[in-house]
Amino acid sequence: MPSSTKKTRVAIIGATGYTALELIRILLRHPHVEITVATTRQEDAPQLSEIHPSLRNRIDLACTLLNPQEIAQAADVAFTCLPHTASMEAIPKLLAENVKVIDLSADYRLVDPEVYEQWYGHVHTDPTRLGTIVYGLPELYADQIPGQDLVANPGCYTSTSILGLAPLLCGGHIDPVGICIDGKSGVSGAGRSPKMITLFPECNESVMAYSVGNHRHTPEIDQVLSDVSGKEVEVVFTPHLIPMDRGLQCSMYARASSDASEKEMLEVMRKFYENKPFIRVIEALPRTKDVAHTNFCDMTVRVSRGTVQVFSVLDNLIKGASGVAVQNFNLMCGYDETTGLLP
Ligand SMILES: NC(=O)C1=CN([C@@H]2O[C@H](COP(=O)(O)OP(=O)(O)OC[C@H]3O[C@@H](n4cnc5c(N)ncnc54)[C@H](OP(=O)(O)O)[C@@H]3O)[C@@H](O)[C@H]2O)C=CC1
Ligand SMILES: CC(=O)N[C@@H](CCC(=O)OP(=O)(O)O)C(=O)O
């Protein structure tokens, strides 16, 4: 572990958004961190507490423009809370200045630049790095994260589904083809910038499926589940927007490929996540309410008519974004994985 007196200096890139706010809240209670930089494209250097009034009297810091050389003077590690494409512009410059990066966007998650272009509709501008970056889901890749300069934080639907499905897939209890994932996300999952479908009169008192057949998390889920299970996984993923601020639930369906009972499958999940502090395998059906504002992911399983149903929940802004980013930061820097994250 690094010296306990010297704090790690942290930059929040894209500090005006939702994931940044959650990150700042977590890092303010992290004993080994000092937040030294916060960036925005706004040129009038707003205080963080003007942008996020809940930070009043908690942190006094004026936001600056994103300047990699200046960031390198003031920070050791940067969390990039930017939209995809903006991240891959900023990150090579930060790495060139020896700033370590945890990227919350999707820019470094996929290993194949052609798959990125196909699903994101943009040519990847840093293609040679793809395939060399660790996927930052610590429950599956913890041993590869320490000492990395760049870690790709997972998407929120992807974490919820991968964490739920991995134990039974790796244990040979579900068929890797034809897995259906029915995901439901609170509106903060879409970020703070206004969009038509997230306006209050559009989404309140309403539930809708969106991006059916073309959601960008589909190849990410296939890629990671194939990697961890050694099988060629193909999922059908249907996201839904639901009128909640935060929280994400996935109901997942797969053909059983063993005759294990429900109780045995629950035991497989428990064993898989033994000693993983943020995964709670439970008997009851999980609720978003019970993981809100925490870094926990709760899950369970049911077996019915030859079909296995896995239910998994997390807070999209914490375990789905900023909490797991801090888990990755802790592992990268040699701190205990749970530092700053336990309630
Ligand atoms: N919200 C969620 O639940 C999750 C989000 N993510 C991912 O995390 C990242 C951040 O998400 P979130 O905080 O919700 O997003 P927000 O829209 O809330 O915030 C985005 C931030 O990026 C800045 N920004 C926007 N466009 C650009 C640009 N072109 N160049 C530079 N800066 C820009 C904005 O700052 P300003 O306008 O002040 O410059 C703002 O601070 C995204 O990649 C998102 O996909 C991942 C998992 C879950
Ligand atoms: C409700 C909502 O809109 N959610 C977002 C997912 C947020 C996320 O995980 O984003 P990235 O993978 O892009 O980083 C979406 O469906 O695009």
Image (tube, rainbow, N blue to C red):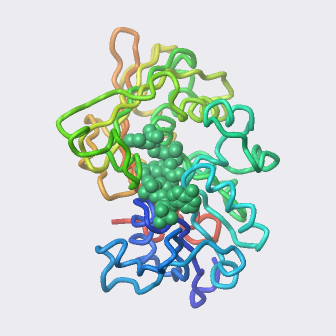
Quarter of the figure with the C terminus: bottom left
Which residue lies at the image location 72% right of the left edge and 44% below the top edge?
124
Residue 95: percent from left, percent from top: 75, 66
Front-most of residues 186 and 263? 186
Which residue lies at the image location 17% right of the left edge and 36% below the top edge?
205
Residue 62: percent from left, percent from top: 47, 83
Up the image or down, 298 lies above or below 311; here it is: below
- Extreme residue toward the bottom, this view: 5
Up the image or down, 61 lies above or below 224; here it is: below
Count every numbered label the image shows and give the total: 0
Front-most of residues 140 and 197? 197
Front-most of residues 82 and 336? 82
Q: Is residue 270 visible?
A: no
Which residue lies at the image location 79% right of the left edge and 68% below the top edge?
96
- 86 sits left or right of 275 in the view: right
Residue 318: percent from left, percent from top: 41, 56
Up the image or down, 172 lies above or below 154; here it is: above
Q: Quadrant of residue 54?
A: bottom left
Q: Is residue 227 visible?
A: yes
Front-most of residues 149 and 273? 149
- 91 sits left or right of 240 in the view: right
- 42 sits left or right of 92 in the view: left
- Extreme residue toward the left, this view: 205
Up the image or down, 161 lies above or below 65; here it is: above
- Extreme residue toward the right, this view: 128
- Extreme residue toward the front, this view: 43
